[in-house]
Every structure is written in structure tokens, then in C-alpha cells.
Image (cartoon, rainbow, N blue to C red):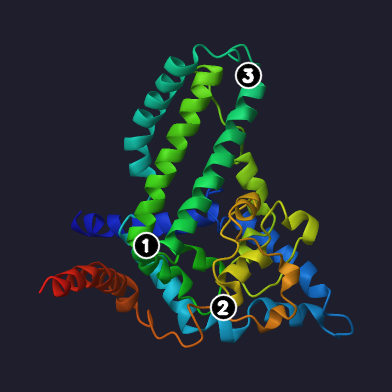
């Protein structure tokens, strides 16, 4: 009985970790990984002409030892495991905040605009509309939060953890500081609350998301189109026309580049229109030699080199940013 009590938390934790591979709401869902691998093969075949053993070379191309054995990859995995151990999930925040936000926003619209004229909309169209509203709002608020994480110095100190990755793998998506995770969880709760509130006002209480394997249908399509290649060394561009509307894996790699010309570019997740509106958009074709891209905060960066630094250095640097102006003011009044 004692052994079972001791083993239960461990088995629950292992189940939680393995569940990421079987949950369509997670980026590393097995189907998303499989389609990313297929798209990586398509990208590879463009450069594999004349090779006698293309499959063998492809395996080495996708899983190069210098990336998968890199210390940065090791840290990505540890941060993922530690954050899951800390139960850093947006689920609790969403449950607490979403309903009050939805009720308040729906009531505000009803009081301001009167009764909606769309209450008789067919159920299938209600589901599709609600799913689309949720997708667009989520994508915009994700972009805006990401943009602010770069532009506000205090927030940037925490977002640096993600950008300190010197090599990119699908696990890098989970390389984030707990404070940033909490911020995104709060964003998600607010976004879902507003989406539900707007849709409740427009269509009434019968709301059902159009889902594929339990995930938002639009998010599912985005993820199945090689989303895991965004954090990888595989250069996959959609071409100039599509990239004006949808962020390609190559465009996100530009965002992670430590070349000064690429700083603060392509903040978007799925839609490129936000980057274009905020004048921070860059096409993949602007990079003439993508194989020479390097990643990280800068080529001379020495921060976040250990696990201790990843978790505690943001607090130290943020404190310095906060204290320095105070000390400056005090010195002026002496």
C-alpha cells in the first residue's frame, strides 16, 4: 500500500508527459510530428539529387548529432520536464477566469448594442463561426503578447529563456520561463472568455467548437502543416504569396536568428497579417543563405548557459532593471 502511494505521483507524472504525444492540442502530438517529418523529407529531396542512399542521408539530415546532442537541446528537455513537474498549465487559470470574462463581455455587448440579429443562425454555421472567432482572437492575442515580450524590457528578461536556445528542435516550443507560461495562460483565459462572450451574444447559448480529434479545426490544420519544423534546422518556406498571409516554418526560424537584421521579425504564430500591420514582417526569401542561420540571443551571448541561470537569471536581470531607475532618481536628489 505504501509503495502504491509512493508510485502514484510518479506514474501520474509519466502519464502526463507521454500524454503530450497523444493529445491533438499539444504541438508534439504524434500526427503533427509525422506530417512534419514528411514535409521535412519533401524539403530534403530538393537537395538530395544524386545521392546513392537518400533515406540514410535523410535520417542523418533530420537527426544530426550536433543538434540533438547539443547542450541547448538537453536544456530544452529538462525545462519541459521540470515545468510539467511544477504543473505549469493554463487549464486552472482558464477555468477560473474564462466564465466571468465571457459573462461580463456578453452582457456589455447586449447592453451596448441590443439583441443580436444572428440568433437564428444554423447550428453548423454557429460552430464554424465560433471556431473561427476563437482561432483569430487566439492568434492575435498570442502575437500581441509575443510582441510585448520583446518590446517591454522587463518582460524580455523572461522571454530571453526561449530565445537563448542555440539549436532548435520541436521540444524548444516548451522552453519557456514559468513567469512567461503564467502570462500566456492568463492571455488564453482572457481570449477564450472574449471569444465565448462575443459568440454567446451573437448566436445564443448553443456554442460548440468545430474540432478535429478534439482540437480547434483551424489550429489542427496549422499544426499538421509542419508546425514542428518552426523549431528545427529544416528550412521550409511557403513562398512569397502564401507567406504574406501565413507564417511558414522558415519565417519563424528567422525570428530566432541571432543576426541583427532579423531581430524582432515575424512574431506571428499562424497568421502573418499581424506582423504586416505592426511593420515587423519578413519573407523567407529575404534570407539568401538559410543554411548559415545561427540561433540564440546573440553570437556573443553568455547568459542562460545552465539550468540554474535559465530559471533564476531572469529574476536577477529584471530586478536590476527595476532598481536601476530608482537608484538614479535617488542620486539626482542628493
Q: Is residue 46 left or right of residue 175?
A: right
Q: Where, quadrant-wise, is the C terminus in this rendering?
A: bottom left
Q: Which residue is mark 1?
A: 155
Q: Where residue 154 appears, x then y in whole percent?
A: 34, 64
Which comes before the other along the chain, label 3 or label 1? 3
In which quarter of the view is residue 327 placed? Answer: bottom left
In the current view of this chain or complex, which residue is farthest to the front?
Answer: 333
Can residue 214 be seen here? no
Image height of 276 relative to 216, above or below = below
- Residue 195, percent across and down? 50, 32
Residue at numbered disc 2: 260
Disc 3 to disc 1, C-alpha distance: 42 Å
Q: Which residue is the extreme one toward the left? A: 334
Instruction: Give the distance between the C-alpha atoms of the residues marked 2 and 3, in whole angstroms.
Output: 50 Å
Residue at image point 34% right, 43% down: 93
The residue beneath circle 3 is 123
Q: Earlier in the sequence, mark 2 or mark 3?
A: 3
Amino acid at each position: 500500500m505504501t509503495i502504491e502511494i509512493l508510485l502514484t505521483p510518479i506514474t501520474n507524472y509519466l502519464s502526463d508527459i507521454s500524454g503530450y504525444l497523444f493529445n491533438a492540442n499539444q504541438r508534439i502530438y504524434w500526427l503533427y510530428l509525422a506530417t512534419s517529418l514528411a514535409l521535412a523529407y519533401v524539403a530534403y529531396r530538393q537537395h538530395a539529387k544524386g545521392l546513392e542512399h537518400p533515406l540514410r542521408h535523410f535520417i542523418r539530415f533530420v537527426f544530426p548529432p550536433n543538434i540533438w546532442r547539443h547542450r541547448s537541446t538537453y536544456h530544452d528537455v529538462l525545462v519541459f520536464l521540470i515545468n510539467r513537474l511544477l504543473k505549469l498549465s493554463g487549464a486552472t487559470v482558464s477555468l477560473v477566469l474564462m466564465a466571468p470574462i465571457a459573462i461580463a463581455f456578453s452582457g456589455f455587448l447586449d447592453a451596448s448594442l441590443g439583441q443580436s440579429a444572428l440568433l437564428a443562425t444554423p447550428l453548423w454555421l454557429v460552430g464554424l463561426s465560433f471556431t473561427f472567432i476563437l482561432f483569430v482572437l487566439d492568434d492575435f492575442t498570442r502575437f500581441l503578447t509575443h510582441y510585448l515580450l520583446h518590446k517591454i524590457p522587463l518582460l524580455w528578461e523572461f522571454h530571453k529563456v526561449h530565445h537563448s536556445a542555440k539549436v532548435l528542435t520541436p521540444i524548444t516550443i516548451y522552453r519557456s520561463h514559468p513567469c512567461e507560461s503564467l502570462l500566456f495562460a492568463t492571455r488564453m483565459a482572457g481570449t477564450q472568455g472574449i471569444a465565448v462572450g462575443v459568440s454567446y451574444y451573437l448566436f445564443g447559448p448553443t456554442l460548440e467548437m468545430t474540432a478535429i480529434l478534439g482540437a480547434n479545426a483551424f489550429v489542427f490544420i496549422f499544426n499538421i502543416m509542419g508546425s514542428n519544423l518552426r523549431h528545427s534546422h529544416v528550412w521550409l518556406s511557403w513562398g512569397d504569396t502564401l507567406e504574406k498571409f501565413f507564417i511558414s516554418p522558415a519565417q519563424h526560424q528567422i525570428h530566432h536568428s541571432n543576426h541583427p537584421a532579423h531581430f524582432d521579425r515575424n512574431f506571428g504564430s499562424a497568421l502573418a497579417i499581424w506582423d504586416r500591420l505592426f511593420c515587423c514582417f519578413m519573407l523567407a526569401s529575404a534570407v539568401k543563405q538559410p543554411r548559415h542561420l545561427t540561433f540564440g540571443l546573440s553570437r556573443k551571448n553568455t547568459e542562460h548557459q545552465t539550468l540554474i541561470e535559465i530559471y533564476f537569471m531572469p529574476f536577477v536581470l529584471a530586478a536590476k532593471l527595476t532598481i536601476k531607475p530608482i537608484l538614479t532618481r535617488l542620486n539626482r536628489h542628493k
